Image (cartoon, helix red, strand yellow):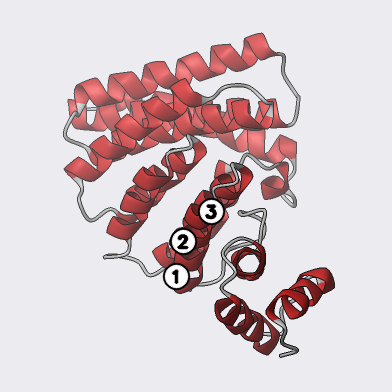
Amino acid sequence: MTADGLAKSFCGLILLASPMVFVGCGPNMFLNDRDSDIKESTQALENARDDIHRAKAYSSRGTAYSEKARFSRISKLIPNEEYERLFDLAIKDHNQAAALDPSNAEVYFSRAQAYYDRGALDLVENKDGKSWFDAAALDFEQAVAKDPKNSLAFDRIGLTYESNGEGDKAIQAYTQELAFDPFAKQRLADAYCNIGFRHQQQKEYVAAAAAYQKSIEWGTADDHSCPYDPAASLVAFYTTETREYDKAWEMLHQLQKARRWIAPEVIERLKKDSGRTN
């Protein structure tokens, strides 16, 4: 995996709003650092000599407010009213940055990240984050329009669309990302796996099988990202739904060769229905 890929993987944890991201630095240290960022950005704003520098200072302060709000909400350190206040300050600063330097991809990326984090937190708390993901997608799209080689922006667009249940758009974004970073192969494997899972939940087995097959073609889906193993699901589909036993055995042999676990009852069902033992 490339260094940028590692960064994306780590950022993926951040996007999921997991408190584990901050293990080792402690809440006080993290919040103190954000307060320092806010202070430094405010000073930079006061000393800015032109709109470009003012925009950069606003954007930096907006990110610091957003991160402070997000971490405090995750850690349950503040009431919701304080979170809303900090988030509003963040968006106000990001809006100022975009108004002052509308051609700068980074100001849109930073505002999009704040919107995405808000939506992700709402999902964690079983709330509807769609409006925030919609806003994030618009800004991430603006970022790539102004910087077409920004692989991280494409990555974030894909994650945003996935979070919003728009798998086809996520696939498109990751495919574009692939031109700049091979890490997109992992994103595609995960995205197709999740599409397959949704079809499976709706008992659309043919569509689920097609998506799972695409997932396998791109690599091995992360079991933390997709609830079901695509290959194991295909063995079951080919056995019980489409009765394509040769395909089921081929997939089973691939799993066994890779020493990956598959439920014994699935193997026994395949043996019984296909009339084969191997």
Q: Is residue 78 above or below residue 225?
A: above
Q: CA distance from mark 2 to mark 3?
A: 7 Å
Of pointers 1 and 2, the one earlier in the residue sequence: 2
Residue ID at (59%, 41%)? 202
- The single residue placed furthest to the top in the displayed view is 81
Image coordinates of residue 224 in percent, x first then y, are: 66, 56
Image coordinates of residue 184 in percent, x first then y, are: 40, 63
Q: Are marks 2 and 3 in contact (CB under 8 Å)?
A: yes
Of pointers 2 and 3, the one earlier in the residue sequence: 3
Asked whether the viewer can see residue 248, the reply is yes
Apparent side of residue 103 relative to residue 127 in the rendered image (left or right): left
Residue ID at (46%, 45%)? 159
Apparent side of residue 140 relative to residue 245 in the rendered image (left or right): left
Q: Nearer the viewer, residue 69 or 135?
A: 135
Give the residue at mark 2.
Answer: 210
Q: Is residue 172 above or below residue 95?
A: below
Residue ID at (50%, 31%)? 64
Q: Amino acid at mark 2?
A: Ala
Give the residue at mark 1.
Answer: 218
Residue ID at (32%, 20%)? 95
Q: Is residue 274 above or below residue 52?
A: below
Q: Which disc is residue 196 wearing?
A: 3
Q: CA distance from mark 1 to mark 2?
A: 13 Å
**Residue 112 picture quarter:** top left
Q: Secondary structure at mark 2?
A: helix
Of pointers 3 and 1, the one earlier in the residue sequence: 3
Image coordinates of residue 114 in percent, x first then y, are: 46, 30
Count neighbours of disc 2 (C-alpha within 10 A) and say few if under 14, some if 14 to 19, many if 20 or more.
some
Asked whether the viewer can see residue 39, the reply is no
**Residue 260 picture quarter:** bottom right
Apparent side of residue 204 relative to residue 102 in the rendered image (left or right): right
